[in-house]
Structures are given as C-alpha cells and as structure tokens.
Image: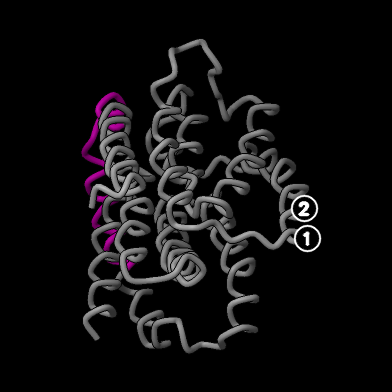
C-alpha cells in the first residue's frame, strides 16, 4: 500500500509537470519507481502510467498535433522496433541512471551544431529512430526528443501535443518489450496490483489537465528556457545516483 500511494502521487505530480513542459515528468517518475522496483518492472509501470499521461495530453491538445511530423517519425521508428524485438536486452540500474543523466545535455549543444529540427523530414525520421531506441534502453527519451523541438518554429502547444503522441506510441512499445518476458518469467507477482494501474488512469489525466492549464498561460520563450534548465537539474541528480552518492 505505501508503494501504491507513492506511485499514484508521483503519477499525478509528474503528469502535471509533463502537461506543462511536454517532458521532465517521465524522468522524475522513473527516478521515483526505480527506488523500489527492478528495471523490467519499472519499465512496465513507467510505460503504463506515462502512456495514459501522454494519451490524455494528446487528446486535450489534439488540434495542435502535427501529423506530418509524426508520419516521418514512424518511418524512422519501425526498423528500430523490428530490430529490438529480436534482441533481449535489459539495462542494469547504473547504466540506466547514467543514460538518463547524460540525455539532458543534448539541449545545451550550440545552436547550429548538430541542430535538430523535427519540421525537416530527414530530421523527423532520425528522431523517430532515436526516441524508440532510447525509450527501450533508458526508459525515457524526453530530452533526446526535445533536442528536435526546442530549436523549431513550432508553438509550445504544437510541441507538447506532437511529442505526446510520439511518446505514447513509444511507451506502448516499451510495455510490450519488457512486459511479455516479465509475465512469462514471474507472472503478475512482481508488478503492482491491477487496481493501481486502474487508479493511475484518472490520476494521470487530472495531472495532465492541470498542467495544460498552466501551459496556456506561459509564453513560448519561457516554455523553452524553463524546460532546458529543469531537465538539466534532473540529469545531474541521475548522474549522482549512478555514481552511488545516494
């Protein structure tokens, strides 16, 4: 019960954060659940909760979704998905924390150097491949995804809405990738009770709804600058955890 409460409270707060910035919430949620779960279990729980959060965010901001960008992403993601399903790979926690700690530094690359722009077809194809690969190996791909959006001309609503659809699909792939082997090995015994997953649906939706309300009050400039600094702080925390400082 204490862990179930932690999961639901974290789902509410991180869904709200993601509703505002389109990312960061997933990184924080993964940080919370890996303190008392194995990697495979954390991947499934993270994928389930975050898929609800992203689905609700997609619905609330559906007029702003850029379907053209998503189409090119799918082209890049499909070959990677096919390859990954032939590989049985589960990262250990130290590697997981290291990858999550390093990802935010992509946002600090100088403008014009390795600049990603999701509005460009080739960039969107590469984005789809990178995001799905990172979501399987690190569990979270928000900072890498943001690398392809922070420097575009899209509005904050278009960024959050389009990223939400991308991450929803990516999380569903993650659930299947880690969930099927886990169920074959241990059944449902190592996962939270089903009622926790059921309760996470309205919890994540409420958090997302509150976050999108805040998003509408922000300017595009503040949105992009806040996102960069927030995920960087989270990255340092992950690196400290990978180093065993706490």
- In this rendering, the answer to whether 245 lies above or below 196 is above
Helix, strand or loop status at disc 1: loop
Is the magenta region chiefly helix, strand or loop? Answer: helix
Q: Which residues are magenta?
A: 204-223
Residue closest to the eye, 183 or 63? 183
Residue 15 painted magenta: no
Q: Position of residue 123 (x, y in %)?
A: 64, 27
Measure the alpha-carbon separation of dots 1 and 2: 5 Å
Residue 166 % position (x, y): 55, 49
Relative depth, front residue between 181 and 129: 181
Q: Residue at x 27, y 61 (%)?
A: 207
Other-residue count near label 2 (Cα within 10 Å), few / some / many at <14 / 14–19 / ≥20: few
Residue that numbered label 2 is attached to: 83
Residue lying at 38% horizontally and 45% vertically, measured from the top left:
22
- The disc placed on residue 128 is none
User: Mark 1 = which residue?
Assistant: 86
Looking at this view, name the residue that lies furthest to the front.
244
Numbered disc 2: secondary structure? helix
Q: Looking at the image, which is closer to me, 88 or 205?
A: 88
Is 141 on the left-hand or right-hand side of 17? right
Farthest residue to the top: give it.
112
The quadrant of the picture occupied by the N terminus is bottom left
Q: Residues within 10 Å of mark 1 (few under 14, many from 20)?
A: few
């Amino acid at each position: 019960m204490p862990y179930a409460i932690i999961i639901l409270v974290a789902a509410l707060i991180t869904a709200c954060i993601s509703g505002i910035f389109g990312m960061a919430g997933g990184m924080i949620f993964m940080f919370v659940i890996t303190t008392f779960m194995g990697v495979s279990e954390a991947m499934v729980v993270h994928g389930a909760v975050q898929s609800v959060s992203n689905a609700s965010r997609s619905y609330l901001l559906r007029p702003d979704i850029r379907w053209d960008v998503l189409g090119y992403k799918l082209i890049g993601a499909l070959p990677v998905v096919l390859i990954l399903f032939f590989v049985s790979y589960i990262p250990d926690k130290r590697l997981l924390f290291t990858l999550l700690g390093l990802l935010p530094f992509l946002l600090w690359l100088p403008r014009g150097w390795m600049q990603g722009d999701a509005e460009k077809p080739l960039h969107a194809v590469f984005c789809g491949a990178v995001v799905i690969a990172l979501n399987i190996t690190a569990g979270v791909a928000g900072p890498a995804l943001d690398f392809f959006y922070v420097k575009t001309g899209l509005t904050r609503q278009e960024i959050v809405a389009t990223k939400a659809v991308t991450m929803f699909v990516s999380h569903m792939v993650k659930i299947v990738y880690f969930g099927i082997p886990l169920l074959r090995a241990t059944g449902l015994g190592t996962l939270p009770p089903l009622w926790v997953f059921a309760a996470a649906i309205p919890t994540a939706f409420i958090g997302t709804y509150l976050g999108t309300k805040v998003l509408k009050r922000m300017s595009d400039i503040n949105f992009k600058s806040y996102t960069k600094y927030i995920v960087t702080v989270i990255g340092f925390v992950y690196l400290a955890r990978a180093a065993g400082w706490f």
